[in-house]
Image (spheres, rainbow, N blue to C red):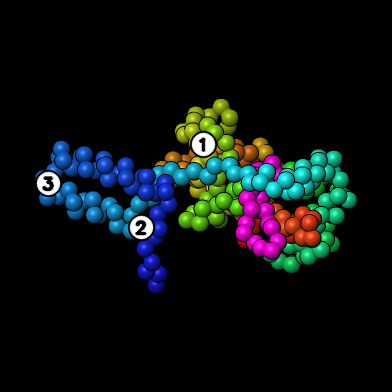
């Protein structure tokens, strides 16, 4: 049995403070003084506070290392023109492509079929490269993980059940229709998947709808282009002998 006291995030502490203030104000108006403290103690019981809002703002630490910034730009340019030779040249020989084997460059080719016109490689690669990321302390080999939704995902939210809203003022609608009534407006919020399995963005498509539930309990649908799971495709880059390489390119967990 796990008896550890849950650690509240900054957003949960903020929510807790506001809740306590409101309860205190209401209690002073409506209850005898001796009941105020027990009520506050009750709502502060570990595990009783659920954040009504949590944010994950975009982060891009790439510019902190000029060599990585230059490499990322070259890789972006290669992806735009589908330069397979360049991409293969920056794969680590033992690149991890999945959690079920298929390691190495040949495994990469098998999974992505990059020579086919309908491959999802290029759009997936460009999307990840455009979504920032962060470095990890990994001496003696520097590493960078992208996108930020993966590298900065808060550990107190289940990565299989939750996702991040990717922009400001994203409309949550009552039906999968761009003209449907708006039930909420979100900006870089963390939300929960409602009743569907997670799909990589490239498979779901940019015109799909994702059913979500906000942390405040509002249910609705969001365009798939504005929401991303932390276990969607991500890339781990490593610098070896002065050269940046792709060491991991996976989805799932």
Q: Which mark is residue 187?
A: 1
Q: Position of residue 110 (x, y in %)?
A: 82, 59
Q: Nearer the viewer, residue 205 or 96?
A: 96
Q: Position of residue 47 (x, y in %)?
A: 35, 57
Q: Closer to the N terminus: mark 2 or mark 3?
A: 3
Q: Which residues are magenta?
A: 127-146
- Check disc 2 and report its element: helix, strand or loop: loop
Q: Closer to the N terminus: mark 1 or mark 3?
A: 3
> Does residue 195 appear in this view?
no
Give the residue pinned by disc 2: 47
Residue lying at 26% horizontally and 40% vertically, measured from the top left: 22
**Mark 3 crowdedness (10 Å alpha carbons): few <14, some 14-19, many ≥20:** few
Q: Which mark is residue 33?
A: 3
* Residue 116 as seen in the image, left or right of residue 250: right
Distance of label 1 from label 3 (alpha carbons): 40 Å
**Mark 2 crowdedness (10 Å alpha carbons): few <14, some 14-19, many ≥20:** few
Q: Quadrant of the C terminus?
A: bottom right
Distance of label 2 from label 3 (alpha carbons): 26 Å
Q: Which mark is residue 118?
A: none
């Amino acid at each position: 049995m796990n008896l550890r006291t849950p650690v509240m995030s900054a957003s949960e502490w903020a929510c807790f403070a506001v809740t306590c203030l409101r309860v205190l104000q209401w209690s002073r108006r409506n209850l005898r003084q001796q009941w105020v403290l027990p009520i506050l103690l009750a709502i502060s019981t570990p595990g009783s506070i659920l954040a009504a809002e949590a944010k994950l703002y975009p982060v891009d630490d790439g510019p902190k290392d000029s060599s990585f910034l230059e490499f990322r730009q070259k890789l972006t340019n290669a992806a735009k023109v589908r330069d397979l030779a360049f991409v293969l040249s920056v794969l680590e020989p033992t690149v991890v492509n999945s959690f079920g084997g298929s390691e190495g460059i040949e495994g990469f080719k098998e999974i992505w079929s990059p020579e086919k016109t309908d491959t999802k490689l290029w759009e997936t690669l460009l999307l990840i490269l455009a979504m920032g990321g962060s470095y990890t302390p990994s001496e003696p080999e520097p590493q960078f993980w992208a996108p930020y939704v993966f590298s900065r995902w808060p550990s107190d939210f289940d990565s299989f059940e939750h996702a991040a809203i990717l922009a400001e003022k994203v409309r949550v609608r009552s039906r999968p229709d761009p003209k449907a009534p708006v039930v909420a407006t979100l900006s870089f919020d963390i939300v929960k998947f409602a009743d569907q399995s997670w799909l990589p963005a490239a498979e779901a498509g940019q015109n799909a709808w994702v059913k979500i539930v906000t942390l405040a309990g509002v249910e609705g649908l969001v365009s798939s282009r504005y929401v991303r799971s932390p276990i969607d495709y991500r890339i781990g880059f490593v610098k070896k002998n002065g050269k940046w390489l792709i060491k991991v390119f996976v989805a799932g967990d």
